Image: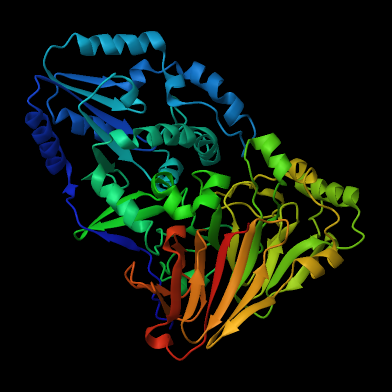
Amino acid sequence: MYNSNYDKFPAILLDGEVHKGWAEIISQLRNDISASGRKKSIIVFELYTGVYYHEILEAAQLLHPSLILESKDAFRSEAEVLEMTWPYVTDDPIFGYMTRLRMVDYFDSSALLNLRKSMDSLAEGVIAVIGHGASLIPQEYDLLVYADMARWEIQLRMKRGEVRGLGVHDHQMPYSHQYKRGYFNDWRVCDELKKRLFPRMDYILDSNKKDDPKMIHSGVMFAGLKKAASQPFRVVPYFDPGPWGGQWMKEICGLDKNQVNFAWCFDCVPEENSLLLNISGKIIEIPSINLVFCESHSLLGEPVETLFGQEFPIRFDFLDTMDGGNLSLQVHPVTQYIRDTFGMQYTQDESYYLLDANHDATVFLGLKSGTDAEQMLKELQEAQNGGAPFKAEKFVNSFPGKKHDHFLIPAGTVHCSGANSMVLEISATPYIFTFKMWDWNRPGLDGKPRPINIAHAAKVIQWERDTEFVVKNLVNRIVPVASGDGWREEKTGLHENEFIETRRHWFTKQVLHQTNNIVNVLNLVEGREAIVESPDNTFEPFIVHYAETFIVPAAIGNYTIRPHGSSVGQELATIKAYIRF
C-alpha cells in the first residue's frame, strides 16, 4: 500500500496572538473599547458574503451595545437588487458578465441616512454595526473587525442552502445559480470593498468553521502575507467528487477511501483556495486571494502585475479519471469571445500533463481532418435532444496517453481527458468557462443532466485544428533547452498562442532556477521528496512531496531544488509554469 506523504494542510509559520472562541474575542474587543476612554464607541463587523450572519449578530450582542445597526436594513429592496444585478447574473444557467457594481450601489440613500441619524442621536455607549457593507454606514468608527471567508467554504455552504447572496434570498435556488451570482457579482463586489478596507482593518475574523471563530490583529495577517511572498509556499488544496471521478488521489493524496470518488483537486487556484497561518501553534485560515491583493508586486513580479493587475494568472489542478470515466467533451472560449460575452480580459488556455496513466488512457484533442462542422453540430444537438448518442470518435481525435505526456490545449480546441488518466491541468485562471458539448449520456452527482453549451461552443471552435495540426503543434512538443551536472531542462509547451511557458527539469542533483522577477508555479511530478533552498539563505528550506504544487514568488529570484530524504540518488522531475514575455 502506498504511504502518502502529500500534505493536505500546508501552513505559514508565524508568531503572534490568536483569540479563539467568542469569549476571548469579545473580551479583547471590550478591552480595546475601554482603553479608548471614549464615551461613545462604534465597532463595525464587516462581513464577506457566505459568513454565518446570525453567528456574528449573536456575538455582537455579547458586547451589550446600546445600539445594534444592521446594514441590510439600509439595502435596496430585493426586487431592486435583482433588477440591478440582472445584467451581470443574466438568465444563462451557468454564465454571467463580470460586474461593475460596488457595495455602495446596494444601499438606499434615504435608509442609509436614517441609520446614520440613529447613530448620531446616541451620546454615549457602544454601537455595533453589522453586515455586508457595514463599514460604509458610519462615516467614522473606532474598530473594524473583518469577518473573512474562503470561496471554497462559501461554495460548500451554498450547496447546503445555508447562505444567501448579497441582498437576495437565493439560498433555495440551485447551487449553480448561487455560484454564478457569487462568481460574477457578489465576490467581486466584496473584493473591491475589502481591498479598500485593508488599511483600516483592526482585526481579521476567521469565519470558515461554524461556532469556531478565531481572531487575529490585522498586523499579524499582513506579516503572514509578507512572509508568504518571500518564500516558497503552498495554498490549501481541496478535493471534490464528480460524475467521472477516479480513485488515484485517494491513494496518493491520502483521502477518504469511503468516498465514491474524487474528480478534482484544486491545488493552486488562489481565487478559491485558502492560506493557512500557523500562529504559535494555532491555525488561522484566510482566503489566499488576500495574498494576491496585498503582496502582488512581490508575489507576481512587476511584469506580471503590470499585465494582469491583482490577479493570479496561473492555475494548477488535478483531474482524476483513474477507474473513472471520460470528462465531458468541451471547448474553451477564444479571447475576443470571452471579453465580448462575459467581460473577462483573458481566456482559459490550458494543457494536460499526465501525472499517471493506465495502458488504455486516452486524450481527445482536436478534430479529425475533413470533419464537417455542420454535421458535427447537428449530431451534437440531436444527442442533446434525446436522439442517438453522439459518437465522439467519429469527429474528434483520440490519442493514447502515457505518464509524463503533455497535451497542449489553446482556447478554441475541442478536447477532454479520457478514462484512466491522472491529469495535472496547467492553465490560465478563468476556470469556469468550459463549454460542454457532450457528457456521454450521464447525469451529474445530483442525478440531473449537467448543462450543455453547444450554442456557445459553436461560436468558438477552431475548426482548422485538425489531426495534422494537433500532431504537429499540440502533442509532446518536447525541446531540450539546457543540461548540467545531474540535471537537464526541457521545454514542453505551451502553444505559441498561449501566454504560459512550461519547463520540465529532470534531476539527480541540485538544479538552479531563476524567477527572473516572474512568479513560478511548480509541481513535483516524479520522485517522493525534494527540497527547495535559497542560495543566499533568504528563506528557510522548503520540502515538497510528490504531486504537490507550490508557488515561488517573483521576489525570491534564485532558488535551487534537489532530491531529499529517501529520494536522494534517484531521478526526480518538476514541471514549472510562468508567464511568457
Q: Residue at x 40, y 31 (%)?
A: 193
Q: Is residue 316 left or right of residue 388?
A: left
Report the front residue among 550 and 395: 550
* 468 up-or-down from 487: above or below: above
* 496 up-or-down from 506: above or below: above
Quarter that holds the N terminus: bottom left
The answer, for residue 370, to whether it is visible in the render is yes
Label count reads 0
* Location of residue 35 (image quadrant): top left
Q: Residue at x 44, y 48 (%)?
A: 296
- The residue lying furthest to the bottom in this view is 569
The answer, for residue 244, to whether it is visible in the render is no
Report the front residue among 382 and 115: 115
Q: Is residue 333 left or right of residue 323?
A: right
Report the front residue among 239 and 31: 31
* Location of residue 30 (image quadrant): top left
Q: Looking at the image, what colour scheme do you see?
A: rainbow
Q: Position of residue 113 (x, y in %)?
A: 33, 10
Q: Residue at x 80, y 70 (%)?
A: 471
* 209 up-or-down from 67: above or below: below
Report the front residue among 240 and 183: 183
Q: Is residue 515 left or right of residue 279?
A: right
Q: Position of residue 467 (x, y in %)?
A: 84, 66
Quarter that holds the C terminus: bottom right
Q: Residue at x 52, y 70 (%)?
A: 247
Q: Position of residue 472 (x, y in %)?
A: 81, 69
Q: Is residue 35 left or right of residue 148?
A: left
Q: Position of residue 222 (x, y in %)?
A: 30, 47
